[in-house]
Image: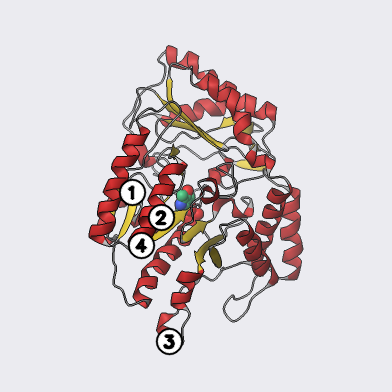
């Protein structure tokens, strides 16, 4: 433990991490024997439960045949099969799959493709439009288009050029959302005209790290129309929203919009192995398709399209295909509990999108001792990691009715804690807790 430097962690002050021994379905077993319901799918990656036998078997079988091979000048069946499977569930205009190995690189690839797309067409563009509160990863390009925070401020001088728009976050019973959307759309129209950006990058329907902020499909439809009209590209970062999270296969399908590029990772392998994909239209692909070597997309990673990752992803997609109700029906399962949440006096802005439910703890905006809350949930046998003052649930699709009830009971039980005013408020920056 002393030799490991943990991500997003101030090693001097952080408490010792909890050691996890095993996972089965939605339940994690800790070293001290405690069992914890994983209500956040282990950092949003685990789709179908831990140790799902179909996926582990697929990896095992692939490992006995071919664990890895260089992906330039060579190819393999798992990569080809997975590309075909992915395209089956994406809008028909998305046609070409470029593999990498994590969400940040999926975004980085999209940004470089978009930039070079205009270079190859002989059109110079050099700026992006993104959204306040966004999170797209920790590589420099992805970080550039994420929101300004204590993390990114340090690197300010290294970042790409961009302009930001507010995210039209809404919730159940929101009466002013339409006006806010209109305001943002008119600012978008102006920016698109003035700056002639390369692309607009957005987390469609649900902005994750900023606290599961949710926007309406109609906003995406209007935004997509504006972007198309302007000649810029539209990039969807569906690293978190992909593979059923929003109640449909992808947020683009749920919102009936078609981006030019889509970034996929996290749930793609069911949470078993690191793998990512950036999928683009023929039009983008064609701008690189040339006799001139300079037009080539010179980008790749050693583990690009790792066959084990592809095998895990194929098994995951086949499981989703076999039983799509595991994600399409989850919103209905949340519904009765959501009605109760709306009545709790210490909560507000309750919101739901497919498998994801989020709520704000009242009066704690911006600064909040989320560590205390996280510990509280652990004592209740639930893994929930609030984002600032936002409590959210993103369970694996295998969650049982009893487990779901247990998770909600732990939130309802907060009532006693809040009425006793037992939670202390400390000065923790809101964004400091993707952890
Ligand atoms: C997690 C996340 C990323 C970054 O993915 P990593 O695999 O952690 O690099 C990018 N975009 C969104 C929307 C994410 O939620």
Q: Secondary structure at mark 4?
A: loop
Q: Nearer the viewer, mark 1 or mark 4?
A: 4
On the image, numbered disc 1 is attached to which residue? Answer: 151
In the image, 140 versus 281, the foreground residue is: 281
Asked if ligand 1 lies within 8 A of label 2, the reply is: yes
Are the residues flagged by discs 1 and 2 in contact, CB closer than 8 Å? yes
Describe residue 395's horizontal placement relative to residue 55 as left or right.
left
Q: Report if the CB atoms under discs 1 and 4 are less than 8 Å apart.
A: no
Q: Which residue is mark 4?
A: 232
Name the mark nearer the viewer: 1 or 3: 3
- Mark nearer the N terminus (3 vs 2): 2
Please state which of residues 352 and 108 is positioned toward the viewer in this rendering: 352
Mark 3 to mark 4: distance in Å?
Answer: 24 Å
Q: Residues within 10 Å of mark 2 (few under 14, many from 20)?
A: some
Residues at marks 4 and 2 touching, judged by CB atoms closer than 8 Å: no
| Sequence-first tag of 4 and 2 | 2
Q: Residue at x 28, y 66 (%)?
A: 126
> What label does residue 138 carry, if any?
2
Q: CA distance from mark 1 to mark 4?
A: 29 Å
> For residue 315, which quarter of the picture?
bottom right
Identify residue for label 3. Answer: 292
């Amino acid at each position: 433990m002393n030799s490991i430097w943990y991500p997003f962690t101030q090693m001097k002050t952080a408490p010792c991490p909890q050691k996890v021994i095993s996972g089965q379905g939605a339940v994690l077993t800790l070293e001290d024997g405690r069992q914890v319901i994983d209500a956040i799918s282990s950092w949003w990656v685990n789709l179908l439960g831990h140790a799902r036998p179909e996926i582990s078997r697929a990896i095992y079988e692939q490992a006995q045949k071919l664990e890895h091979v260089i992906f330039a000048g060579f190819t393999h069946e798992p990569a080809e099969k997975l590309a075909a499977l992915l395209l089956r569930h994406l809008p028909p205009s998305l046609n070409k799959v470029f593999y990498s190995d994590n969400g940040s690189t999926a975004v980085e690839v999209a940004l470089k493709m978009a930039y070079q797309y205009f270079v190859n067409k002989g059109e110079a563009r050099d700026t992006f439009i993104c959204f306040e509160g966004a999170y797209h990863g920790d590589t420099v390009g992805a970080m550039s288009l994420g929101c300004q925070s204590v993390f990114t401020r340090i690197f300010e001088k290294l970042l790409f050029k961009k302009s930001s728009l507010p995210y039209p976050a809404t919730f159940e019973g929101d009466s002013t959302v339409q006006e806010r959307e209109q305001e943002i759309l008119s600012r978008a129209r102006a920016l698109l005209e003035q700056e002639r950006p390369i692309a607009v990058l957005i987390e469609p329907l649900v902005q994750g790290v900023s606290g599961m902020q949710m926007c309406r499909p109609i906003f995406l439809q209007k935004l997509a129309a504006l972007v198309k009209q302007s000649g810029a590209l539209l990039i969807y970062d569906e690293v978190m929203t992909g593979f059923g999270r929003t109640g449909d296969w992808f947020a683009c399908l749920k919102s009936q919009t078609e981006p030019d590029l889509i970034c996929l990772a996290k749930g793609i392998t069911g949470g078993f192995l690191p793998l990512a994909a950036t999928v683009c239209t023929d039009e983008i692909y064609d701008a690189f398709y040339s006799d001139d070597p300079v037009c080539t997309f010179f980008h790749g990673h050693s583990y690009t399209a790792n066959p084990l990752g592809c095998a895990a992803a194929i098994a995951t997609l086949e499981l989703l295909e076999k039983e799509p109700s595991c994600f399409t029906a989850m919103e209905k399962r949340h519904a009765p509990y959501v009605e109760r949440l709306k009545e709790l006096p210490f909560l507000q802005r309750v919101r739901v999108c497919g498998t994801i439910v989020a709520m704000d703890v009242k009066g704690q905006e911006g600064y909040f001792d989320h560590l205390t809350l996280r510990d509280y949930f652990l004592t209740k046998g639930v893994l929930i990691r609030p984002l600032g003052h936002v409590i959210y649930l993103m369970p694996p699709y295998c969650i049982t009715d009893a487990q779901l009830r247990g998770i909600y009971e732990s939130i309802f039980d907060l009532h006693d804690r809040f009425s006793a005013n037992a939670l202390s408020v400390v000065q923790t920056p809101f964004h400091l807790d993707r952890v």
